[in-house]
Image (tube, helix red, strand yellow):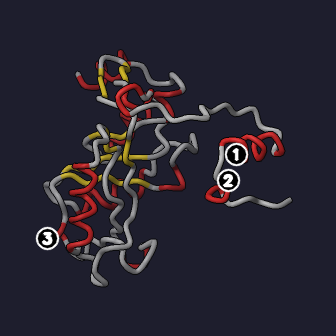
Amino acid sequence: MTYARIASLRTPEALQGHIDQAGLSLRFDPELAAPASSPLARPFDQDGLRVGNRFCILPMEGWDGTVSGEPSPLTLRRWENFGTSGAKLIWGGEAVAVRADGRANPHQLLLTDETHWPDRVIVMSLAYVGSDAGPDLATIAGIEARAGARKVYAAGGVRNAADLITAWKAGAAGALVATALHAGKIKAGDLEEIAGL
């Protein structure tokens, strides 16, 4: 099987031919709508929350920090550009390594000691994201023990309301949840009940 570079499919017909050859059922608009009438410009409403348009930025680890793990002017410029891009949602935050041997690349941001920690820290174990395996309690507890008065938030693996309580008992001040919400395994009423504990 050969794989075409998406950038080489320069016309709607070429893209449709590639989709057909792959045996996929995937529709797309052959012409882009004007910005004001684009579906991507429409607000998105879900569970009482409104996002101003359909553009979302999901920053992960950058390749623009210093060798020692500090943000560089390029890191700051990247985040300023996120803010001025017009996207109405920034999903999550920068993926920052907490150990030198855990960096995804030599220029990923790195927490070298507790003086560089922000007030709130998201502990995301990528192997747990979408895994339906429960939160990474050992890592949450380990980071929480080093975080001092800072708030630690769990991310990845949360399956249900019971997992939220378990993460809280491991030291998490809160949790980022996606898969369980999308699958309907956690409801708004569950969150209200937990918030009252």
Residue 153 in the image: x percent, y percent? 30, 47
Of badges 3 and 2, the one in the foreground is 2
Mark 3 or 2 closer to N-term?
2
Q: Which residue is mark 2?
A: 9
Mark 1 or 3 closer to N-term?
1
Spatial CA distance of label 3 from label 2 is: 49 Å
Q: Is 173 left or right of 115, judged from the image as shown? A: right
Q: Which residue is mark 1?
A: 15
Furthest residue in direction right, as rendered = 1
126 or 23: which is nearer to us?
Answer: 23
Q: Which residue is mark 3?
A: 115
Where 161 falls versus 59 (above or below)?
A: above
Marks 3 & 2, CB-CB < 8 Å contact: no
87 or 186: which is nearer to us?
Answer: 87
Marks 2 & 1, CB-CB < 8 Å contact: yes
Q: Residue at x 31, y 44 (%)?
A: 90
